[in-house]
Image (cartoon, rainbow, N blue to C red):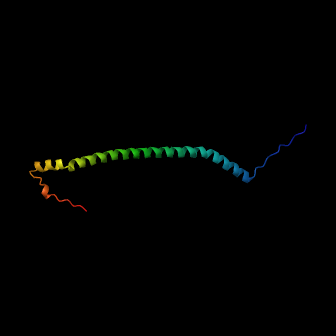
Amino acid sequence: MVKKKKKVLKISKFERLLYTFTFMLLFTSPLLLIFTKGTLSKINYEVEKVKENIVNQTKKNDSLTMKIDELVSLNNIQIVASNEGLSYNNNNIKSISE
């Protein structure tokens, strides 16, 4: 019987480094993708919360603006003046116009 010699393939350091780098890249790419998608989802959730807060604050501002307009109205001023014992005299009001 004749024994056949097995050929041993020698891998150079560069090839070993190349294989290691490729393996690491293939292993870390999905993990990095999952991490970035999770971060993006979290940021989108925070953006939606901020948008909701802006809408709520805008509604409050509109409500307060309406309340201010209501309190500044001439009828309200006359009612408050009469309740406090003051009289409304149109001649005492001076308008400044440019």
Q: Toward which corner of the image does residue 4 lie, by quadrant?
A: top right
- Total numbered badges shown on the rendered structure: 0
Question: Please, which residue is most extreme toward the bottom here?
Answer: 98
Q: Where is residue 88 drawn, in percent x and y?
A: 12, 53
Q: Is residue 68 left or right of residue 22?
A: left
Q: Is residue 95 above or below residue 58?
A: below
Q: Toward which corner of the image does residue 31 lie, by quadrant?
A: top right
Nearer the observer, 13 or 80: 80
Q: Which residue shows up at 39% across the image and 44% down it? A: 52
Question: Please, which residue is most extreme toward the left here?
Answer: 85
Q: Which residue shows up at 66% across the image and 50% down it? A: 21
Q: Which residue shows up at 14% across the image and 49% down it? A: 78
Q: Quadrant of the C terminus?
A: bottom left
Q: Quadrant of the N terminus?
A: top right
Question: Please, which residue is most extreme toward the right here?
Answer: 1
Q: Where is residue 87 drawn, in percent x and y?
A: 10, 52
Q: Is residue 92 left or right of residue 41?
A: left
Nearer the observer, 60 or 96: 96
Nearer the observer, 1 or 16: 16
Q: Which residue shows up at 22% across the image and 47% down it? A: 70
